[in-house]
Image (cartoon, rainbow, N blue to C red):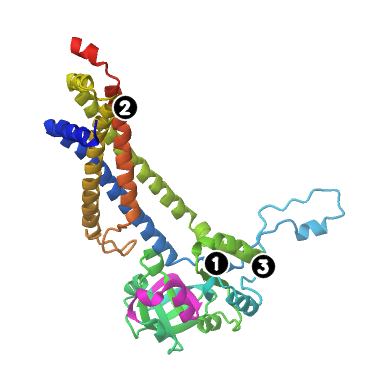
Amino acid sequence: MSLSVNLSIARTHLLSRKKQSIVAMLGVTFGIAMFILMISFMKGVNQFLEDIMLSATPDIHIYNDVKTDYSYSIAGDYFRDSNTWTIVRHPKPKQINLNIKNPEAILADLKKDPLITAISPLLSTQVFYNYGPVQLNGYIDGVHINEEDRLYSLKDKMIAGSTQNLLTSSDGILIGSGLASKLNVALGDLVTLTTPIGTTMQFRVVGIFTIGIATIDNVKSYVNLSNVQQLLGQNSNYITDINIKLKDNEKATMESGNYLKKYGYKSDDWQTANSSVMASNLIRDVLTYVVSITLLVVAGFGIYNIMNMTIASKMKDIAILKAQGFARKDILQIFLTQSLIIGTMGALTGLLLGFALSYALSRVPFPANNSFVSLKYFPVIFRASYYAFGIFFGVMTTLVAGFMPSLRASRIDPVAILRG
């Protein structure tokens, strides 16, 4: 029979059982809508956490790690010629300088690397912040502020003052918002810093920043690199860390291994340094797909049951169609078309509902919480690939769910049915 006749019969069957058709379509609709909502939200959460992580973590961090080699001891030398065993319990690591040797040559070589977009030499130390009777423990980073800005986009994180103020002030300090709040300081105030070895210096607040992570904003400040070198009594070549930003941070793992071999210093990439965050992102992704696909499969079983009920109630109609000359492929086409219509309409309405729910969630204000992150709205990502996957999987689920009942209908013996 012609395709138009088969489509007409399929439409008649759907319209004759409107409630069942709508219920089946709603199953697909809500399944796809929940898939769109969940994947958009979970991906948004993952992207937000990754952005927060990268806002405080360089792509590659080069530093002089503490090495604890206990294979050698003075006691071992003293008793070398003795026949007795020499055992040293709980040896202490030897005192070493944590600065990077010959940093100018390393920095000059790194600047030649075409994969690098920003390099920031760093000298960090623990300090006590003193303002009046208040004393807080934290740490301070001595940096070249323009390079640090290129690394972390600090100018976008300033809530008072500017990063450039650090260049025009010999004793300026950029202070974290949480720390500024605890010390009750504002622009222009003087803060006294004391190192663990007892050295003190006064700095004037020229800017206040917020990274969005309280564990950083409550303890961290920036000053010029020369100020920290002076505070620690070191020369102008003394640095402890080199932070690097790559054009493509996915190459960080490979490049960090190359830098380790080349310079001999510990080199950590951002994925290794934040392995727990990456693992949690992967777990959330897997959970999202498992739950979403389960919803679509459940919707598919609903279509399967409804198609079975439809075929059971249309046995005589199928027998009459076959008796009138309809072939097996025509019967298969009629009922498979019904399934595809339900799946396609359900998928399209599911995409619209999923987008509406996702957009609504993206406009919900995030509860104010100063103890962890600064976030205005719930993070949601809108990507065409999520919607394409949703409609594809939704239609395929209904196609598979409708195929078996349709195949069974095409194999019905009309003589046996008409005989009763």
Measured along the vertical axis of the image, is residue 47 above or below residue 320?
A: below
Q: Which residue is mark 3?
A: 262
Q: Quadrant of residue 4?
A: top left
Q: Secondary structure at mark 3?
A: helix
Q: Earlier in the sequence, mark 2 or mark 1?
A: 1
Q: Is residue 203 visible?
A: no
Left or right of residue 25, residue 251 in this image: right
Residues tagged 2 and 1 counted as in contact (Cβ below 8 A): no
Badge 2 amino acid:
Met
In the displayed structure, 406 sits above or below 54; it is above
Residue depicted at x 44% and y 70%? 138
Spatial CA distance of label 2 from label 1 is 58 Å
Q: Start and end of the magenta stretch?
A: 135-161
Asked if the stretch drawn in magenta spans residue 253, the answer is no
- Mark positioned earlier in the residue sequence (3 or 2): 3
Give residue 43's mark.
none
Q: As displayed, is residue 370 above or below residue 402?
A: below
Seen at 79% across and 56% down, the residue is 76
Residue of label 2 = 404
Amino acid type indicated by mark 1: His
- Please, what secondary structure does the residue beneath circle 2 have? helix
> Residue 61, which numbered label?
1
